[in-house]
Image (cartoon, rainbow, N blue to C red):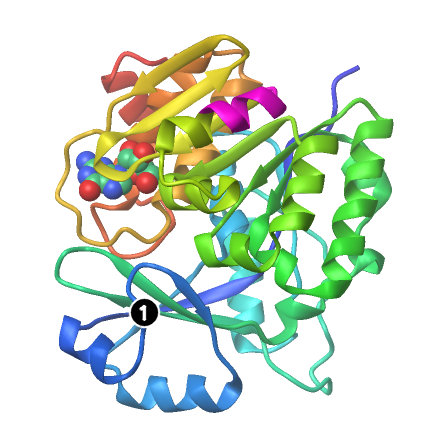
Amino acid sequence: MTKTYHVVGIGNALVDVLAHAGEDFLAEHGVEKGIMQLIDTERAVELYGRIGPAQEISGGSAANTIAGIAHLGGRTAYVGKVKDDQLGTIFAHDLRAQGADFATPMAPGADEGETGRCIILVTPDGERSMNTYLGLSERLSAADIDAAQIADAEWIYLEGYRFDGDESHAAFAKAIAAAKAAGGKVALTLSDPFCVDRHRDAFRRMIREDVDLLFANRAEMLSMYQTEVFDEALAQAAAEIELVACTDSADGAHILSGEGRWHAPAVATRVVDATGAGDLFAGAFLWGLTQGHDLESCGRMGCVAASEIISHIGARAEADLSALFRSHGLI
Ligand code: GMP
């Protein structure tokens, strides 16, 4: 029976506030380069007051992935918490306008807190350093998971960042149970090396028991398996997960399944802003998978989509990804 959704994603619903910044700005304001740091309201206000001109663009890691799949014509839905405020309305509009279903109830305007945002500082080398004020996205709980919707998905895609919220562990457990009971599959992204550090045991349990497809980058993979040897981490992951897709920046991506291993080269491009590269890699990879493409092609699609995202500011596709896949002979 055909399911309504190819992929339903669950994660932190955030609006990105993107600004250019020099290395000295990062040092001066204690921003750690290349990773995600959680910040409180006070710090968000302070940082916002100090950055240069910024652009607000809908973001959120899993939301970017889902938007990418929808952009490619895949059937998708997203689950994440925003508030009924200006940024929440923009976030919902952008996702729906891309063709994804988004039905998570918005927190009412009278509630405390605001829609979450991520202050992203882009250095001249194109690297992104993220400062996340979670706001309402933090409150995603099991009550926000519609088991019938999840059961109607071929894949669910879980964002590792959401491990930072206690109630969201229960939300993930509910989603996994609903997906598995209906023959669905579970994909997880590790999201960030320090997030892995904070929740290694919970990640490990989920990986061993429930995850069919793991997305990670090199730093996250090393953090997960607590080794400095990349190949060793990849081998450990492949031994316990059916399918592993691990990105490695300018070195592209490694795909592992059983005894099989493939490498997809990065697509040469000028790196303007690395924000969303991994998200769109995952989106394109999952789209390819649900369309029945072989694993190597899925990896190559991921790298083509990632190269589009890093060639401009923001984590949502601007060019026609299907046209790019055609020009690379992938479809
Ligand atoms: O990081 C996810 C994906 O983005 C990688 O697998 C690459 O496809 C792409 N990517 C990330 N960093 C770079 C880079 O510095 N150069 C190029 N060409 N691609 C990158």
Q: Residue 3: give x, y in percent of width and height.
A: 74, 24
Is residue 8 depicted above or below 51 in this figure? Answer: above
Mark 1 sits on what residue? 32
- Residue range highlighted in magenta: 235-242
- Left or right? Give the position of 130 relative to 206: left
In front here: 229 or 91?
Answer: 229
Mark 1 lies on a secondary structure that is loop
Question: In the picture, which quadrant includes the N terminus?
Answer: top right
Q: Residue 303: give x, y in percent of width and height.
A: 31, 30
Question: In the picture, which quadrant includes the C terminus?
Answer: top left
Q: Is mark 1 within 8 Å of ligand 1?
A: no
Q: In which quarter of the image is residue 307?
A: top left
Is residue 322 depicted above or below 262 in this figure? Answer: below
Q: Is residue 237 magenta?
A: yes
Q: Residue 89: give x, y in percent of width and height.
A: 57, 68
Magenta segment, prevailing SS (helix, strand or loop): helix
Q: Can residue 318 be seen in this view?
A: yes
Is residue 271 depicted above or below 20 in this figure? Answer: above
Q: Can residue 308 be seen in this view?
A: no
> Identity of the amino acid at label 1?
Glu
